[in-house]
Image: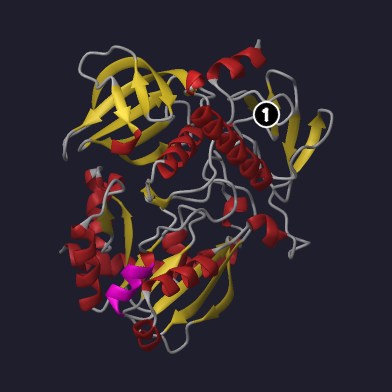
Amino acid sequence: MKAAIGSVITYLAKLIFPVYTRIFGRLRKGRVDIAGVKPPFFLVANHQTEMDPLYIGTAIPGRISFVATDSLFRNPTVNYLMSALGSIPKSKFSVDPSSIRMMIDSIRRGWSVGLFPEGQRSMAGYTDMIAPTVGRLAKMLDVPLVVAKLQGGFLSHPCWAYWPRKGRCILNMSLLFSQEQLRRLDPDEIQEAITDSLYNSDYDWIRTQPRLRYKGKKRAQGLHNIMFACPECGSCDCFLTDGDLSTCKVCGYSVRWGDRGEFILAKGDRLHHANLEEQDRWQKEMIETAVQRTGSDPSSDAIYGPCRVTIRRKCKSGPLEIIGDGDVVLYEDAIRVSRLDGCPPVFRIDNISGFSVEAIRGRRNRIVEFLHDGTVYSFVFHDELESTYKWHLMVRRLKAGRGGKHVGGEAADDGAGIGGSYAENRASEG
């Protein structure tokens, strides 16, 4: 019964959705060169919008099983629908042999397998680190490798934005390697080719589209979660949003979100960054500086905090339970928690995996989630301006510096995070 429902949904989606996108202009096909490629194949794609599986799945021949984080399967109704469509749940905290078996089973059934190897949607408009195991996975599946690249999806609906903008997304697809070519290549060569072919910057791309505009309402709403450091005064978690404006509450530096995703100076000495990508790369350099300073000066090893959070815990497949409220402080080697019954006082960086942004929009959705010594924990930040993305970057950088190779479903980055201690940040606010 479930398989039949999935087949009907897939058929209707392929029939109706292309018509919908043509009428409303949400999606256009760019360079699509997969003629003669028959399923099953392994498809990898950059991740820009929550509609990406639908954009891709309705544009390719045959059925496709997309790999998705297992947190999406917690709701019984969503679990039933995604299972009917053949979606494959994967733990974001560790290597998941069961998901690999399900991928192989899908291939044997003649279904293609789809994967977004960034592990999450684009936060700042450009492709993030690619999971370092995807080359080995492509080699193991032993089917043709297809690459899908979406452009304009971030500008049309950033993951942190409350509302989409009016504007199109372009879908490009091509065969990267045939089965015979894959068999001749080693995993590292495949990995490098996937990384190169998936890289996209919406800000570079839109320069080639001079007539394209993305208009909408309240386009800066939610931007504070990604734009968490002020380039004018150096304060952190200080941006307030109103309509298209993002304004530092400390110094008044203000930028407007433009029709092409650009920053337009509204108030300040000068425009420090032309767009969110430049802002994001600068913030990562700040974190790199903060981590290096902490490592060389043991007397100032607190990198960030304290921050007030509600701490929740989930053992195995059970529901999340609230432990209580406490203060968390980030150090080079651990996240330390104020005394709280039932909660570990220290979360060692070496024992943390999968530290990721679980929710990024809405007043009640300031959540990060991670695995520590076999138990899933989540922090729900009380401060409405506290950036979960900032915490993700900081922990990822610290994990990489301590020899971690794979954090939160993504490869470790050499530079990610926020500069300055909590005391320095609050001093600049006062």
- Where is residue 234, by image quadrant? top right
* Residue drawn at point x = 28 percent, y = 16 percent: 324
Q: Is residue 95 left or right of residue 38?
A: left
Q: Is residue 246 left or right of residue 267?
A: left
Which quadrant would the N terminus be assigned to in this image? bottom left
224 and 92: which is toward the camera: 92
Q: Is residue 366 left or right of residue 268?
A: left
Which quadrant would the C terminus be assigned to in this image? top right
292 and 388: which is toward the camera: 292
- Give how far across and how far down residue 343 sits, in percent: 24, 20
- Give how far across and how far down residue 44 sits, in percent: 42, 67
Q: Is residue 140 in the magenta section?
A: yes
**Residue extending furthest toward the right:** 269
Crowd rating for badge 1 (residues with CA inside 10 Å; few <14, some 14–19, many 20+): many
- Give how far across and how far down residue 13 sits, in percent: 39, 66
Q: Circle 1 is placed at which residue position? A: 230
> Which secondary structure is most common in the magenta stretch?
helix
Residue type at the position of mark 1 = Cys
* Residue drawn at point x = 73 percent, y = 59 percent: 212
301 and 126: which is toward the camera: 301
Visible residue check, residue 186: yes
Q: Is residue 329 in the magenta section?
A: no
- Secondary structure at numbered mark 1: loop
- Where is residue 137, by image quadrant? bottom left
Above or below, 3 relative to 218 = below
* Residue drawn at point x = 34 percent, y = 84 percent: 183
* Residue drawn at point x = 74 percent, y = 36 percent: 256
Above or below, 387 relative to 69 = above
- Give how far across and how far down residue 122 sits, in percent: 52, 51
Above or below, 173 relative to 275 = below
Magenta segment boundaries in residue numbering: 135-142
Q: Is residue 120 left or right of residue 241?
A: left
